[in-house]
Image (spheres, helix red, strand yellow):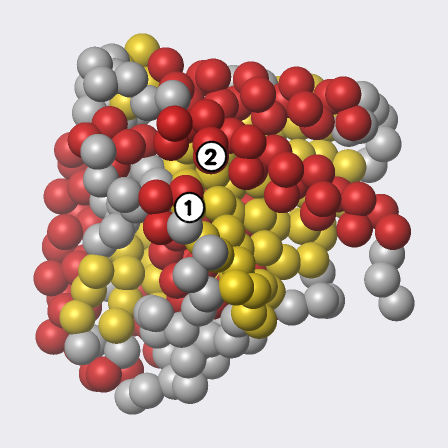
Amino acid sequence: MTDPLHSELLEIALEAARRAGELLRDGRPADLAVAATKSSPIDVVTEMDIAAEKLITTLVAERRPHDGFLGEEGAATEGTSGVRWVVDPLDGTVNYLYGLPTWAVSVAAEQDGETVVGVVAAPMRGETFHAVRGRGAWASGSWVGERRLGCRPAPPLDQALVSTGFNYVADVRAHQAEVAAKLIPRLRDIRRGGSAAVDLCDLAAGRLDGYYERGLNAWDWAAGDLIARESGALTGGRPGERPSRDLTVAGTPGVFEPLQQLLEDYGAWHD
């Protein structure tokens, strides 16, 4: 049975992601500047991240004033409705800063602590991905219409294409490179796209077999994690745990399990 609340949250998430994506795509100044840095001087915030988050928070507050909010660029309210929005207004900021196309707006809605709606809009790719818990994962775009997503059948691990990302703190990134060097001989290859949200959606769309990254926050993976799971993929963190800053792992059944164990064996979750 379709939950009317979840349908309402999906409608709001789709509109918020679409409008923020249009703002970022159409409003990107030629002389785009760095507004601030986060974990290190190369982990940047642009003026457009801030503008996109403000657009989303304003829209959500107008439609559902009693909901909570957690946003990457600092927006945080508790709310009283049991619903919380978890938003990354621009996932892939460095790609955006350099004019690369792999960036996205990620909007998720939680109900009583569980993600029930996820939307990832990738405007430069002309795609929007969305999922509602228990209703599957979907992609839409002008070039493909709307289609239900399903992850790929699992290949042997040595034929798996796996994506990852690297932290902006130098010593953490160096350790991640060591882990990747150990993994590469065990896999078909490794990709580094620059947006966790897009990577998780590409897994859902059958374009990847697996994905892992250390150091993500809830806003990085909340929407993409639901989309991946609703496509049939498995997601988690360290064995027996949920995704966390220590480790986020996702993969098709049959790839997820050995990939997660290799990452545990290689100490991917610590320096």
Drawn side of residue 78 relative to residue 139, left or right: right
Q: Residue type at mark 1: give it.
A: Ala
Labelled pair 2, 1 in contact (Cβ < 8 Å): yes
Q: Could you say where residue 34 lies in the image, as x and y percent from the top left?
A: 26, 15
Q: Which residue shows up at 62% across the image and 43% down it?
A: 14
Q: Indicate the secondary structure of the residue bearing disc 1.
A: strand
Drawn side of residue 204 relative to residue 37, left or right: right
Q: Which mark is residue 122?
A: 1
Q: Residue type at mark 2: give it.
A: Gly
Q: Which mark is residue 27?
A: none
Q: Which residue shows up at 46% across the image and 56% down it?
A: 142
* Quadrant placement of the N terminus: bottom right
Real-space CA distance between mark 2 and mark 1, rounded to the nearest whole angstrom:
7 Å
For disc 1, the neighbor class at 10 Å (few under 14, some 14 to 19, many from 20) is many
Q: Could you say where residue 92 lies in the image, as x and y percent from the top left?
A: 33, 38
* Image quarter of residue 25: top left
State whether residue 218 is above or below residue 266: above
State whether residue 61 is above or below residue 90: above
